[in-house]
Structure formats: structure tokens, C-alpha cells
């Protein structure tokens, strides 16, 4: 299967895909995570250019493009190809390792093991392997089962229909319950990779058994949840399906007490780059920010109690940042 095109509307989508493919190879096959990060950074920088890159002048002064990546871009602009990419694509072992990492839960180390020790070269071979279930964890087995489905993005319209069911079923349990779909959907994305749900209840004593109850209803009553990957008191990871005509989708549900809810809302709305940015701003201003709370860092490094937060706005205010609406949070 061809690599997924993540940026179909970008004027430089081919170059960006090539850089990402080079990066994936470094991460999965060479296991050089810093090289992977360098490619990702370069691809991200190019994704923001906004017009087609024709000559090296067009990338002058762009952030995150070092000498080696620059040379590869030069090759691409003059020949339409990148030698290293052609070599990588001809490397059968490397291609096999990359295939294995398509499966949810299979990381580079496990992929290397499957290819080198078990001599598995393709997804079909993994599916047909006599020892398949011993070679894979429960999560990986689900990842393999739904591989092609999980690789499809969820259109916004389907997300909205799933939101309706989720909010209806969760709030029907108890009128003190609140549920929101966060992640890329809340940022207004036209399509999302998975469904991220946040839940809170005004009474903290209700929380521990809550998630099991929610998942039980979503599984048995409405047959929306089809599989559980993992479940604890505060986090559920699983698989769901709007109806039998639709694909299986990945769903995460997280439960937070009221006083942590807005920090969680901000964090799980993202995007991840904005989170990183806000964490750094917080540090600079003497705060510690994470998905649970914002705390003041004292001169001796001692953390204060979590500061009162009753909205996302409060967090932006503490950091003296202008409020960003969810759809302005795509950094
Ligand atoms: P994701 O579901 O991984 O991402 P997303 O919803 O933004 O995009 P997608 O459509 O591809 O699913 O994570 C949800 C949010 O959680 C993300 O926007 C920011 C936060 N997050 C981080 O800050 N760092 C991380 O490493 C991850 C995985 C998530
Ligand atoms: Ca998501
Ligand atoms: Ca998610």
C-alpha cells in the first residue's frame, strides 16, 4: 500500500510526503529517532510555505532545514527524485519493518523482531502466521484485525453522528454528567483519526465506577463500542462503530474530576504543538501546566496547590496569553 497522503491540499504535498517517508524509515528501520524528528520538522516547515516550491530560493530562511535535508530537497527539485528514498524503497527488510509498524501497538522494536526473527515480510504473512496470536499482544491483534479500517480518516459528519450518540447515552446516566468530543474534531477538522471523549461529573465520589458504567452501556445497550483495548478508572481505549455500514473507529474516553476538567479540555483539544508551546510559556512565567492542573512554581521549586480553573480562558489568563478559540489552535 502507498503511504498515506497526510496533506492532500498542500502545493508541496509530494515533497512533504517524501520527507515524511524518509523520516519513517529512520524511525522504524534505522531506529534513529533524532533523524526522524529532523525530517518531521522540515516537513512541517515546508507544509507552511503556502505556494509551490520551485527553486532552492523558495526554502531560503525556512526553519528546521539542515544541510543534509537541504541537499535532499535540492535533488528532488532538480531530478524529481531522492536517491536515499529510492534506496530505502528497494530495501526489502526495511519495507517489511515499515509494514509491521502500520499495526496499532507494533513499534519499531517489535517490528524488527517480527521481520528478523520470524521472517515475516508482509501484513498478509503476519495474518496467516501459525503463531500469530502468540507473537502479538491483545492490542496488536485488534490493530491487525482493523488495520485497513483504522487507516481511514473519520469524516466530520460521521464524527457529529457519533457525538450525538455519545453525549445522549452518557448524559442519560446522570444529569450531573458532562461529555464533550475533543481532539481534532473540537478544533474543527474536516476529518479525524480517532474519537477523543472527555467526561466529568460534579461529584468526585461518583467517578471511580463511572467509566465502567459508561462503557457497559455503550457496548451492550447501544452496541456502539465493539472492542475494549484497555480500561481503568479514568481512561478507556477501544473500538467503536456508528452502525454496521460504517468502519470501525478508535475511541478514547477519559474521565476527570471537575476541578481538572478545563486543563484536560485544553490539553486534549490540542493540538500537540500548542500544548508544547503553552507548557514552555508556563515554565517561563513560573508555572507548571499539564493535563490535570496549573500550579505556581516557587523560588525553591516547590509547587503550589493547583490554581483555581473554571474555564480554558482562566489558563490563558494565568499565562497572559490571548485566548484562542478551538479552531485557532492548529499550530
Ligand atoms: P490525538 O487524538 O493523538 O490527536 P488529534 O485529535 O489532535 O488529531 P487526530 O485527528 O489525528 O486524532 O490527541 C488528542 C490531543 O491530545 C492532541 O490534539 C493534543 C494532545 N496530545 C499531546 O499533546 N501530545 C501527544 O503526544 C498526544 C498523543 C496527544
Ligand atoms: Ca484524535
Ligand atoms: Ca486520541
Image (cartoon, helix red, strand yellow):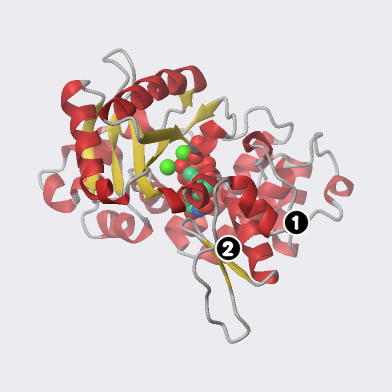
Residue drawn at the location 49% of the way across and 31% of the way down:
192
| Position of residue 44 measured from the top left corner of the image (x, y, whole percent) | 67, 48
Quarter holding residue 188: top right
Left or right relative to 323: residue 154: left
The answer, for residue 38, to whether it is visible in the render is no
Q: Is residue 41 above or below residue 121?
A: below
Residue drawn at the location 32% of the way across and 34% of the way down:
147
* Nearer-N-terminus badge (1/2): 2
**Element class at badge 2:** helix
Left or right relative to 189: residue 220: left
Q: Are marks 1 and 2 in contact (CB under 8 Å)?
A: no
Mark 2 Cα within 10 Å, few/some/many (few <14, many 20+)? Answer: some
Look at the image and tell me in which quarter the C terminus lies: top right
Along the line of sight, the residue nearer the viewer: 145 or 235: 235
Residue closest to the far right: 57
Q: Nearer the viewer, mark 1 or mark 2?
A: 2
Left or right relative to 116: residue 301: right
Quarter holding residue 325: top right
Cα gap from disc 1 to disc 2, whole angstroms: 14 Å
User: Mark 2 highlights which residue?
Assistant: 35
Q: Is residue 234 above or below residue 201?
A: below
Amino acid at each position: 500500500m502507498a503511504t498515506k497522503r497526510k496533506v492532500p491540499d498542500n502545493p508541496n504535498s509530494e515533497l512533504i510526503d517524501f520527507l515524511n517517508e524518509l523520516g519513517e524509515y529512520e524511525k522504524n528501520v534505522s531506529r534513529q529517532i533524532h533523524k526522524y524528528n529532523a525530517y518531521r520538522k522540515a516537513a512541517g516547515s515546508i507544509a507552511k510555505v503556502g505556494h509551490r516550491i520551485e527553486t532552492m530560493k523558495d526554502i531560503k530562511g525556512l526553519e528546521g532545514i539542515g544541510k543534509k535535508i537541504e541537499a535532499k530537497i535540492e535533488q528532488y527539485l532538480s531530478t524529481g527524485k531522492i536517491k536515499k528514498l529510492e534506496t530505502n524503497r528497494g530495501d526489502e527488510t526495511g519495507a517489511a519493518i515499515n509494514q509491521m509498524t502500520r499495526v496499532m501497538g507494533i513499534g519499531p522494536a517489535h517490528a524488527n523482531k517480527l521481520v528478523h526473527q520470524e521472517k515475516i515480510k508482509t501484513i498478509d504473512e503476519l495474518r496467516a502466521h501459525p503463531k500469530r496470536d502468540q507473537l502479538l499482544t491483545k492490542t496488536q491483534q485488534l490493530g491487525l484485525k482493523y488495520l485497513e479500517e483504522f487507516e481511514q480518516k473519520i469524516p466530520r459528519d460521521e464524527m457529529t453522528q457519533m457525538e450525538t450518540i455519545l453525549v445522549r447515552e452518557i448524559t442519560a446516566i446522570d444529569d450531573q454528567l458532562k461529555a464533550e468530543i475533543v481532539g481534532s474534531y473540537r478544533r474543527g477538522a474536516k476529518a479525524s483519526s480517532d474519537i477523543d471523549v472527555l467526561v466529568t461529573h460534579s461529584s468526585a465520589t461518583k467517578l471511580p465506577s463511572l467509566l465502567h458504567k459508561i462503557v457497559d452501556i455503550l457496548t451492550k445497550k447501544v452496541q456502539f463500542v465493539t472492542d475494549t483495548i484497555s480500561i481503568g478508572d479514568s481512561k478507556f481505549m477501544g473500538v467503536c462503530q456508528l452502525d454496521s455500514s460504517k468502519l470501525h473507529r478508535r475511541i478514547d474516553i477519559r474521565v476527570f474530576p471537575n476541578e481538572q476538567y478545563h486543563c484536560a479540555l485544553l490539553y486534549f483539544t490540542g493540538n500537540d504543538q500548542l500544548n508544547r508551546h503553552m507548557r514552555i510559556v508556563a515554565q517561563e512565567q513560573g508555572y507548571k501546566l499539564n493535563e490535570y492542573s496549573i500550579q505556581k512554581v516557587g523560588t525553591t521549586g516547590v509547587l503550589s496547590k493547583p490554581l483555581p480553573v473554571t474555564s480554558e480562558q482562566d489558563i490563558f489568563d494565568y499565562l497572559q496569553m490571548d485566548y484562542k478559540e478551538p479552531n485557532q489552535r492548529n499550530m
